[in-house]
Every structure is written in structure tokens, then in C-alpha cells.
Amino acid sequence: MLTIPQMCLTAGVGYFVGSLSFAILVARSRGVDIRSVGSGNPGATNVKRALGRGAGNLVFLLDFLKGFLPALWPMLVFANDSGLLSILGLTGAILGHSFPVYYGFKGGKGVATTMGGLLAVMPVVMLIGVLSWVVVFYTIRLVSVASIAFGLALPLAGWGLQAWKPGWFVNILNNGSGDHQSELVFALLISLLILVRHRTNIVRLLRGEELSFKKKD
């Protein structure tokens, strides 16, 4: 049975870990304030544009892990209701990344952190979302549109799994009961958050001003 201290602990650990902005820290180690260059967003994409592929990939990996670890550790520590505690840990990490207490509550979009956490708690849904990201990005070379596609794919994947009910799908939130309602609701909430966090990108897309990664000749 869940207890208030367990819920507060997992959500709190997730939030404070998620609040670590590796984009700011990595860029600062190179003498750059990532919030004042490019799009100004403290995320892996802006770091990659400003400092190169190596720095950008490092930030992505670290952001991925700060979603994965807060979602994973409750499964290793708490025997009962660990799935719900993992969701609280992931939720805290996503909110921490988006609204970090250490940086005036102004953070990144949270896509890499979301991917990391979903790998721990909803791996099939996450993989479908990542596939959507890859297809869209390598088609039009716009990270923002690929990230929006990732967000939209999550509830669609959750709905598809709920309707299909594949026997090999591990339902972490409901202990294998076969009821995917919790996954569907959580995926929908994450999708809405990703869309809200990309609202400025959507405006730039409508104006034709969004930055892209063009293929090199």
C-alpha cells in the first residue's frame, strides 16, 4: 500500500534530480551560457547547435538518465506499488527539468528526460514514440516537429496497446492486470505537457522561422 512518505520521497527525488540542467552545466564548462545563444533553450538540441555533436549528445544522455533513474529506483527498492511510485519519480523529473528550482524555474522541453523515464515504466510506448521521432526528424530535419510527433505518438500508442492487449506487453502500472487505462492517461498528460512546452516552437514554425538541422553536402 502506498504511503504519503513514499510518494513524497519518490516525487521529491525525481524533481531535484530533474532540476539539474546538464545543458547549462556542460555549456558553462565550455565558457558558454546556453540560455543566451541560439534558441536560448537549455536542452541538448541547442547545445548541439552551439557546441557541436559531442556536447549535444552528452547532454542528451545525461538528460535521458535523469528521467530513467528516478523512474527505475523505486522498482528496485519498493516491492509493492513500485509502478505508481516510478510514475511519481518520472513526473517529478520531468517537472524538474521543465521548471528547475536551481535556475529560476526556467528549463528545457523535457523530451530526453521523458524518453529515459518511459524506457523504465512504459518501454513499448516509448519505443513507438522514438520511432515516430526518428521518422519525422530524418524526413524534415526539424527537432521541434519530431519532438511534437513523439509527444502525439505516446497516447496513440497507449490507446493502441489498450485496444490490442498484446499478451507480451508488461503492464507495470497495473501489475500485469491487462487494464491499460493508467498508461493511457499518463501518456496523454505527457503529450499535453510536451505540446505546451513547444508552444514557442509552434509559433516559429507558423512564421517559417524555426531552426533546422540541414543535411550537409
Image (spheres, rainbow, N blue to C red):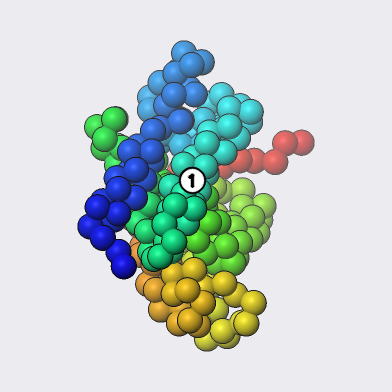
Which residue in the rendered view is the most extreme toward the top? Answer: 31
Q: Residue at x 50, y 61 (%)?
A: 121
Residue 206 in sight: no
Give the amino acid type for the residue marked by disc 1 in the picture.
Leu
For residue 208, above or below residue 173:
above
Viewport quadrant of the N terminus: bottom left
What residue would you read off at disc 1?
69
Q: Residue at x 46, y 42 (%)?
A: 66
Relative side of 129 to 35, left or right: right
Q: Nearer the viewer, residue 83 or 18?
A: 83
Q: Secondary structure at mark 1?
A: helix
Relative side of 61 to 111, left or right: right
Q: Nearer the viewer, residue 72 or 19?
A: 72
The 10 Å Cα crowd at callout 1, few under 14, some 14 to 19, many 20 or more, is many
Q: Nearer the viewer, residue 120 or 52?
A: 120
Which residue in the rendered view is the most extreme toward the right? Answer: 217
Position of residue 169 measured from the top left corner of the image (x, y, whole percent)? 60, 75
- Rendered image quadrant of residue 123: bottom right
For residue 207, above or below residue 34:
below
Position of residue 109 measured from the top left corner of the image (x, y, whole percent)? 41, 46
Position of residue 149 measured from the top left corner of the image (x, y, whole percent)? 52, 61
